[in-house]
Amino acid sequence: MPTKLSRRDFIRLCAGSAAAISMTPLLAPLLTEAAEAGAPPVIWLQGAGCTGCSVSLLNTIHPDIQKVLLEVISLRYHPNISGAAGDLAMEEGIFKVAEEYKGKFYLVVEGAVPTGANGKFCMVGERDGHHITFVDLVKEVGSKAAAILNFGTCSAYGGIPATPPNPTGCKSVPDIVKNVPYINVPGCPPHPDWMVGTIAHVLLYNDIPELDRFGRPTMFFKDIIHDNCPRRQYFDNAIFAKNLSEPGCLLEVGCKGPIAHCDSTTRLWNGGTNWCIKSGAPCLACTEPQFPGWPVYARVPEMPIAPGITATTDQIGIVLGAATAVGIGGHLAGNIATGRIGPKKHSDEKDGDN
């Protein structure tokens, strides 16, 4: 092991770095040490997406992204920021690295995988005079990787590109590449710390961190947004906003905080400046496999609370009982059971109310 930092201390470091204190400067010396000791290379591929995950990574500010990419992460290929381009970049940065480090390198995938029309909806290059589809590239390179890191909800679960009617046949990477370990780092986009921290773990320990049942690192995705929401006191007092500009809990205008798992409430974004709910927007649960398959700015009719189980917010506390309710925040179920949150009323709603 190239570092003396124990796994337990690493998890504490990742989980404890919050609000304006990026963990990247703390990890940088250790990752540089790992790279100098021969840390596995990383290949980054992009499919059907908006490049938002890469943009989020570029928001790493301490140290600056140049240091992260050149000295911290052994990044051999990235379609947007690699110096080389075209056939040379793909041959030297992807295929040669994948073959030379077979079973030892890590593959990062950003974006869903289009499978319709034999993959022709997403062409990523040429090789020996033949077009290369993204689905074929992911299969070939992914099958040789030590593990696949799916950055963003699109590659992890399908995300927006896979939303019905899904004319391009987009699928998640785990649906395409089998028998290879993978780590899902969802989000639309993911926080820079989630991506850098996940890469840090695999480079420092050459192993996969502890994951939840959806393949997410628990060091970033074990917390529920609702439990630490700054508007929680409104919920506790049954004060619900009917419009986005109003004070109150945002459950009635589409907040999915009770089912969303991540540490945005304490980590914050943009250098510890802000995050969704603090800026006045409801949580859209973009880290969940179901995203974006529900109403955006309307109360969710049903919430997934366990594998294969959904319930209306009015039923959760009554039907499922305290044991299951813990999974969505015990306070939510309690308020439903006591009648603080009841069936939605329409008779006295004004235009524009949700």
Image: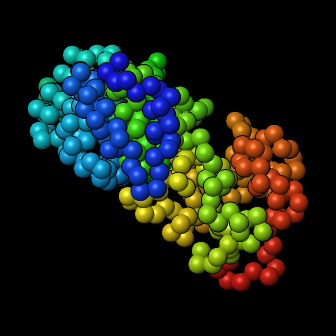
Of residues 21 and 210, the one drawn nearer to the viewer in this rendering? 21
Instruction: Give the vertical position of 344 relative to 179 (above or below).
Output: below
**Quarter-of-image position of residue 352:** bottom right
Q: Quadrant of the C terminus?
A: bottom right
- Residue 30 percent across, percent down from the top left: 31, 32
Colour scheme in use: rainbow
- Give the percent coordinates (x, y) of residue 210: 53, 28
Tell me the quarter of the picture where residue 168 sits. Answer: top left
Work out whether residue 219 or residue 322 is closer to the camera in this orientation and state it.
219
Give the quadrant of residue 121: top left
Percent x, y of residue 126: 18, 33
Residue 71 place in picture, x, y as percent:
21, 36
Res. 66 in view: yes
Location of the N terminus (image quadrant): top left
Q: Residue at x 33, y 16 (%)?
A: 103
> Can residue 118 be seen by looking at this rendering?
no
Left or right of 136? Residue 279 is: right
Residue depicted at 21% across the width and 43% down the height? 67
Can you say whether 327 is above or below 353 in the image?
above
Q: Nearer the viewer, residue 285 or 136?
A: 285
Q: Is residue 151 left or right of residue 216?
A: left
**Residue drawn at (18%, 30%) of the image:** 93
Q: How many circles with numbers are drawn on the protein?
A: 0
Please give left or right for residue 187 compared with residue 78 in the image: right
On screen, residue 133 versus residue 147, left or right, reads left
Q: Residue at x 49, y 34 (%)?
A: 11
